[in-house]
Image (cartoon, rainbow, N blue to C red):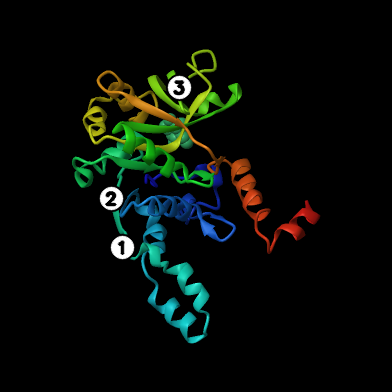
Amino acid sequence: MPVAGFGTRFLPATKAIPKEMLPIIDKPLIEYAVEEAVNAGIEEVIFITSHTKVAIENHFDSNFELEEKLSRNNKHEFISLINPEKYKNVRFTYVRQKSQKGLGDAIAHASHLIEDEAFAVLLADDLIFSEESCLQQLINIHENSGLSVVGVNKVSKEDISKYGVINPSVEEDRNIFVNDIVEKPTIENAPSDLAVVGRYILDSSIFGYLKRVSEDKSNEIQLTDAIKLMLEEKKVLACKYFGKKFDCGSKVGYVEATLFKALKDESMKDMLKKYL
Ligand code: G1P
């Protein structure tokens, strides 16, 4: 999970706390992503982080003092929230990315920890609500095919330039073979309306391709460019996942996600509907 970005769009809120710690109601964005991974059976979470992100390390560590206090005050229901049972067997590892050199560079920082396995990439900004999680849907496809898989969804023309966009080939059962992939194309150059969402299952050979990628005009190494190189030698699948995605890297997406979640919460929805 790359979490080294500055979160400029949310300043001043993100001056002293990481953007991934912004909550959707009562849970930080990063925890939604970690839950999605852990619920899908992932046992090691590697954060590619930076010096401004210690709050994330603390969040996934135990807080003995707080637990003690909650326990003494008979507030046991909160203990499971701050120290969930399901994280007990999960290893959290932190690798510092010293300079902001893009998503591809961030992922490359985990190469020594991953070795020869397929692994998942989750971008916490993309919050997806669905019955079967988006990551689980990708994992199912990877398990059947052995291939790298990227999550995609349709986006409108005006928004296409914000994303990696695939050139799709044949579609079978919502799975599409990817012919090509382009990072943030202009509207005119977009090969389709299928944008990559922040969920990937990647073959470890991606690290070799990442080494061959040169910096783009913003001096960043793009993961998309490494996938493009991978496509010259390997097949890659795209999954049109089922689910509702919110771009929590934007203020509108963040507020929409908050409302979506709140309107599903029995304790809040009636009051909120009245207000809205
Ligand atoms: C990154 C990827 C892009 C992808 C997007 C999904 O872009 O580079 O290909 O479509 O995440 O959220 P970013 O949002 O970091 O600019």
Q: Disc 1 marks which residue?
A: 89
For numbered disc 2, what is the local secondary structure? strand
First of labels 1, 3 by sequence position: 1
For numbered disc 1, what is the local secondary structure? loop
Relative to 64, is 57 above or below?
Answer: above
User: Assess mark 2: CB under 8 A from ligand 1?
Assistant: no
- Place of residue 238 in the rendered image (x, y in percent of width and height, measured from the top left): 41, 28
Q: Disc 3 marks which residue?
A: 171
Q: Is residue 257 left or right of residue 68?
A: right
Q: Residues within 10 Å of mark 2 (few under 14, many from 20)?
A: some
Foreground of the two, 225 or 141:
141
Relative to 131, is 176 above or below?
Answer: above
Kindly tell me whether residue 101 is visible in this rendering.
Answer: no
Type of the residue with mark 1? Asn
Q: Residues within 10 Å of mark 3 (few under 14, many from 20)?
A: some
Res. 95 mark = 2
Residue at the image point whose x is 32% and y is 40% from the top: 106
First of labels 3, 2 by sequence position: 2
- 3D distance between C-alphas at marks 1 and 3: 38 Å
Residue at the image point whose x is 55% and y is 53% from the top: 13
- 3D distance between C-alphas at marks 3 and 2: 37 Å
Foreground of the two, 148 or 31:
148
- Place of residue 147 in the rendered image (x, y in percent of width and height, measured from the top left): 30, 31
**Tag 1–tag 3 contact (CB < 8 Å):** no
**Tag 3–tag 2 contact (CB < 8 Å):** no
Type of the residue with mark 2? Val
- Place of residue 176 in the rendered image (x, y in percent of width and height, measured from the top left): 43, 24
Query: On the rendering, which quadrant does ligand 1 occupy?
Result: top left
Of marks 1 and 2, the one in the foreground = 1
- 3D distance between C-alphas at marks 1 and 2: 20 Å
For numbered disc 3, what is the local secondary structure? strand
